Amino acid sequence: MKSRIDIIGTIVPNDDVWIYDWLEMDCTSPKMVNEALLKAAGNDIDVYINSGGGDVFSGSEIYSALRAYTGRVNIHIVGVAASAASVVACAGHSDISPTAMMMVHNVSSGARGDYHAMDKESEILQQANKAVSMAYETKCGISEQEALKMMDRESWLTAKEAVELGLVDEIAESKNLQLVAAAGGVIPRAVIDKLRNEIKGPMNKATLDLEKGKLNLLKLKGEIKNEI
């Protein structure tokens, strides 16, 4: 009997799931996937992806868990597999809806400090790019240089292009076109930390609605955005 796992919305660390749930935003964490794999108990699994990406290390953990799973992993890209989600999409045999897309790009982050801090951050980002590129190299047999070049130009790939590059194994037949929820956006770490400190202990509904309104305003202003 096959089991199903949905990789939808933003890929987030386990500790951040609560705030996405509270805001009624789709997300996927490594814990969710690991629990689903445990329940699957070695049976074949179908993984449906519609995600704009998110936290690079959480994406790596999900990728590693899927690759280590003892049963067969069938991956179906039904909307978008972008950024960290494109790494997850490389974890098993895959197909892609004719109307779906993949996107690969460089790792991004935020930093502050003097030029030493900026130099260090640049070094970390370049090393992170190399780590992420391994998923693409392993999947389609390209060199590190080719993978990094593809990431550097922020490549948006149609279903046909993704298959031609070897990032996806085949175009999906109609039986696999089961849509899931749309991808969400990454909530900035500063916003999460602020809310985590403010939302401690019981809060009345008015206060909760006010905080939710603040986050919705950030979304409208474009300050919540997709990152790898």
Image (cartoon, rainbow, N blue to C red):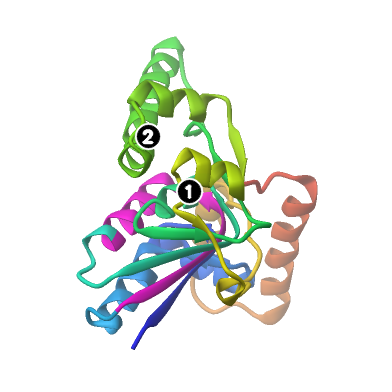
Residue 88 is situated, as x and y percent measured from the top left of the image, at 41, 54
Q: Is residue 114 above or below residue 38?
A: above
Residue 65 drawn in magenta: yes
Residue 133: mark: 2
Q: Is residue 197 above or below residue 86?
A: below
Residue 44 visible at all: yes
Which amino acid type corresponds to the residue marked 2 in the rendered image?
Answer: Ser
> Furthest-top residue in view?
115
Figure quadrant of residue 166:
top left
Bounds of the magenta segment? 44-66
| Residue at screen point 34% across, 77% down | 36
Residue 145 is situated, as x and y percent measured from the top left of the image, at 38, 21
- In the rendered structure, the answer to whether residue 220 lies left or right of residue 187 reads right
Which amino acid type corresponds to the residue marked 1 in the rendered image?
Answer: Ser
Along the line of sight, which residue is nearer the eye, 15 or 85? 85
Q: CA distance from mark 1 to mark 2?
A: 11 Å
Residue at the spot of label 1: 86
Instruction: Tell me the element at label 2.
Output: helix
